[in-house]
Image (cartoon, rainbow, N blue to C red):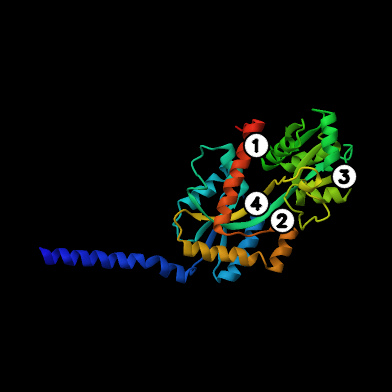
Amino acid sequence: MKRKFIKTIASLAMTAAVFGAANPVSAQTFPDKPIRIVVPFAAGGSSDLLARSVARFMSDGLKVPVIVDNRPGAGGVIAMDAVAHAAPDGYTVLFATNGTHSIGPALYPARKIDPLKDLAPIGLLHTLPNILLVNPGVPAKNVSELIAYAKANPGKLNFASAGNGSASHLFGELFKISAGIDIVHVPYKGGGAAMPDLMAGQVSMMLETIPNAIPHVRSGKLNALAVTSGKRSSAAPEIPTVAESGIPGFDASSWTGLSAPAGTPKAIISILNAETVRIARIPAYLDTLKTMGTDATSSTPEAFDAYTRKDIAKWTAVVKKANVRVE
């Protein structure tokens, strides 16, 4: 009986040793097959194009195909769910955005996927500032003049957005709160739908993405007062930030990053993170992003986690203070 017990213990120890060595071995050989980036948007949009650019340059570095898998719908939850329930082996990752990871949780705190618990951060990829645009009929050549005019004429100005709960809506609400002004929100079904009314003067202002805004600014149809990011955009360096134009500390940027299923080994996370850092320094990659009004960034997994938590807290406060309601 004693011998049988000893043999059982030895067998269990051997099994534990084999499984204990599994993660280091898999990390040493990772990656040895295609990696899938799940994108929560349809093919052809700006986020999809950014993800495909990431996939191309990461494929070069990792020496395996990196494939984009579009899973749009449900505010990003379909894509998040696909990744959260994938094997935690690094071969399925999420093209995370502020929509999936911070604005979504702020608007829908009870949704079934929690990015902080169900997903593991890999690293940041991009920041995408918006431009504060005004119709030329608005008597303001900079942010300070706009704030002064709005305070002198409460409720007279309005701002367009891509819809209730959209990034442009919440960026506008943050601007309104930070400036202490009374401006009326006018939601549209997408930023493109709002642009003709902005140029015609039906709405006063809008916080729109750089690619959609710059052609109208350079044609003289709209005035650009500031970019919403904490620092100037490489795509439009001549435009000052809101922070340096009268509201210190203002930062309302869209962003993207990569996340893996929770439980993915740290060694594999480190390999993927190192690749995000590497591509952020490639001139050809940076040139591609510049054409899309996007800036490259990178971070450690820990910094990405902290950034996400801070962003959730910021937008949760904005949603509450502005009483934002979405159906």
> In the rendered structure, which amino acid carries the disc numbered 2?
Thr
Give x and y (percent) for residue 59.
58, 67
Q: Earlier in the sequence, mark 1 or mark 4?
A: 4
**Disc 4 target residue:** 255
Give x and y (percent) for residue 224.
83, 46
Q: In this view of the protein, can residue 72 be seen by the observer?
A: no
> In the rendered structure, which amino acid carries the disc numbered 4?
Trp
Disc number lying in front (2 or 1): 1
On screen, residue 246 above or below 295: above
On screen, residue 100 above or below 272: above
The reply to whether discs 2 and 4 touch (Cβ–Cβ < 8 Å) is no
Residue visible at 55% across and 52% down in the picture: 305
Residue visible at 72% across and 49% down in the picture: 229
Which of the numbered marks, if any, corresponds to residue 221? 3
**Disc 2 target residue:** 294
Which of the numbered marks, if any, corresponds to residue 274? none
The reply to whether discs 1 and 4 touch (Cβ–Cβ < 8 Å) is no
> In the rendered structure, which amino acid carries the disc numbered 3?
Lys
Q: Earlier in the sequence, mark 2 or mark 3?
A: 3
**Disc 1 target residue:** 318
Give x and y (percent) for residue 4.
13, 65
Disc number lying in front (3 or 1): 1
Give x and y (percent) for residue 143.
82, 42
Q: Nearer the viewer, residue 107 or 144?
A: 144
Residue 144, located in which quarter of the rendered image?
top right
Q: Earlier in the sequence, mark 2 or mark 4?
A: 4
Residue 6, located in which quarter of the rendered image?
bottom left
**Secondary element at image label 4:** strand
- Neighbourhood count class around disc 3 (C-alpha, 10 Å): few under 14, some 14–19, many 20 upward: some
Cα distance between the residues tagged 1 and 4: 18 Å
Direction from residue 205 to residue 166 in the image, left or right? left
